[in-house]
Image: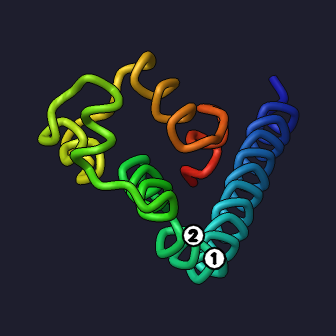
Amino acid sequence: MNVYPVFYLVFMIWLILIAIGVYLLYLIIKALRKYTKAAPVRKEKEKNAKSLGEVLKQHRVTCKMTQEFVAESLGVSRQAVSKWESGACAPSTTNLIALGKLFGVAPEELLKAIQ
């Protein structure tokens, strides 16, 4: 019985496995380089990110309204408006639509402003 063909087959399998391992290592290194180069971009996005509460407060201040006025207009408590602006909770869909009307913008615009 000739051992040479079996040895050759095992050698080729090991060679293929090593090539796959090297290629996977190359892909991991490439992904890590891309990730580390994107760190400044991620930090900038994080810095510019706005929450829904910040967007609501910005619109309220731009329209020169108080939290109490907004609360009375929507039929909710001033504390509810304060919680929305602080991010403790989010307004319901109905209240979000009413806020959009009160601020003179579409509710979609309020949500699009969130990054």
| In this view, the mark in front (2 or 1) | 2
Q: How many discs mark residues in the rendered view?
A: 2
Q: Name the residue under label 1.
A: 41
Q: Is mark 2 on a helix, strand or loop?
A: helix
Q: Check the image and tell me how it is coloured.
A: rainbow
Q: Around disc 2, counting alpha carbons within 10 Å, would you say few (fewer than 14), some (14 to 19), or many (20 or more)?
A: few
Above or below residue 94? Residue 2 is below
- Indicate the position of residue 80 as horizontal and vertical percent values: 18, 36
Above or below residue 51? Residue 105 is above
Query: Residue 54 lies in what quarter of the image?
Result: bottom left
At 38% from the left and 55% from the top, the residue drawn is 65
At 52% from the left and 24% from the top, the residue drawn is 97
Position of 10 with respect to 77 (left or right) is right
Q: Around disc 1, counting alpha carbons within 10 Å, would you say few (fewer than 14), some (14 to 19), or many (20 or more)?
A: few
- Indicate the position of residue 26 as horizontal and vertical percent values: 73, 66
Front residue of 18/2: it is 18
In whole angstroms, how far apart are the C-alphas of marks 2 and 1?
6 Å
Position of 34 with respect to 111 (left or right) is right
Q: What residue type is labelled 1?
A: Val
Q: Name the residue under label 2.
A: 45
Above or below residue 30? Residue 39 is below
Q: Do the residues labelled 2 and 1 touch (CB within 8 Å)?
A: yes
Query: Residue 23 lies in what quarter of the image?
Result: bottom right
At 51% from the left and 64% from the top, the residue drawn is 62
Position of 79 with respect to 95 (left or right) is left
